[in-house]
Image (cartoon, grey):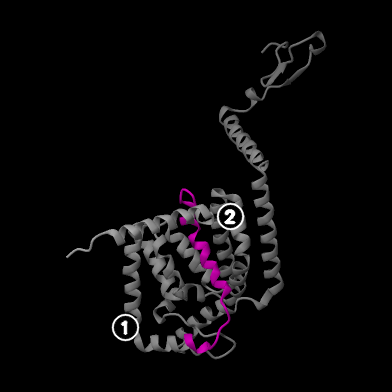
Amino acid sequence: MSESEPPPGLRPVPGSARGRGRIVVDLSDVIDRDTRRRAGVFRRALRREVSRLRDPRRIAAIVLLSVVFALVLSGLIARGEAGGADARAYWAGVRIWLNGGDPYHPTGPFLPYVYAPWMLPLFAPWAMLPWDVAWFVWRVGTILLLLWTIHWAYRQRPLATAVIVAILAFPFAANLDTGNINLQLTLMLWAAQFTGPRLGGLLWALATWMKRVPVVFWPILPGDAKRWGLIWLAVSIGLSVLMLPLTIIQFQALFGFGARPVRLDYLVFLWSAIPWLYRRPDPFDFLRPATWRTRVAALRAWSRASLRRPARR
């Protein structure tokens, strides 16, 4: 290299006489091609995200979700150690059962375990943890999975997702506070729409045999998952029949609570319909009066055609 040539990565600035003698860094000579390509990808992605933030609907969705998350988090922090009563019932029920006791009539400051006796082993790996660790795993794991579903829904329809999350904020917070399994069952119903038919049917059947409410979501299962769901539900019923004496005790404990208030925390199950709803060509057509007018007109036409059709002899 001659003394008059600049080192690699430096080049003289062309132009007028005032620019003579100045040199600047030429990054194309210093940075390899792969690094420049990756930097270009990040740069384009950043530009795309910035352009999205200019959308008023997306900005409204971000603000609404931020407010909802802040309120839910504040409520959970304020509750502190008072939360987790339902999760503690599952945890204590397994430990009482392993020690030869009756999980449906526990002693101590625990709610009774009220689910099928053959489901106790399903809780066992988690219940073996110390309570503080088990409660942390239960709540944090649920929050992470819930945030994953919210992220998926937000990518499809940001503002609609923010509004739905705001409507369901209280059921979300209530289940996260008590540790009730409603939210986990909702996430199971969500996962059932993304897995294979056997696993999807199993998730629906387990959720249904635990809480009964998920039975209404059978129509949203994809393809063969409906058939497998009924098969696994029959297996669940058969297992409960085989353990009939314990199943009778289970139902006695379940209905022994007496009159219970309206379970607003059950509204969380509505979240499990979001994947099915968002995959439709027009998810919110049922909110428009024109849709219902069309359906009523079609129903009337069908009824008139049925009345005019001659009866077969």
In the image, 22 versus 268, the foreground residue is 268
Does the image show residue 40? yes
Q: In the image, which disc is placed on residue 161? A: 2
Residue visible at 50% across and 56% down in the picture: 286
Residue bounds of the magenta highlight:
254-283
How packed mark 2 is, by other alpha carbons closer than 10 Å (few <14, some 14-19, many 20 or more), is many
Q: Secondary structure at mark 1?
A: helix
Q: In the image, which disc is placed on residue 260? A: none
Q: How many marks?
A: 2
Where residue 202 sits: x, y (%)? 38, 66
Is residue 62 rendered to the left or right of residue 104?
right
Where residue 192 sits: x, y (%)? 42, 61
In the image, 10 versus 49, the foreground residue is 49
Residue where numbered disc 1 is placed: 242
Residue 42, compared with residue 220, is above or below; it is above
Q: Amino acid at mark 2?
A: Thr
Residue visible at 67% across and 45% down in the picture: 56
Measure the C-alpha gap from mark 2 to mark 1: 44 Å
| Residue sitting at the far top | 17
Is residue 273 rendered to the left or right of residue 110?
left
Task: Tell which tag, 2 or 1, sits nearer the viewer.
Answer: 2
Q: Amino acid at mark 1?
A: Leu
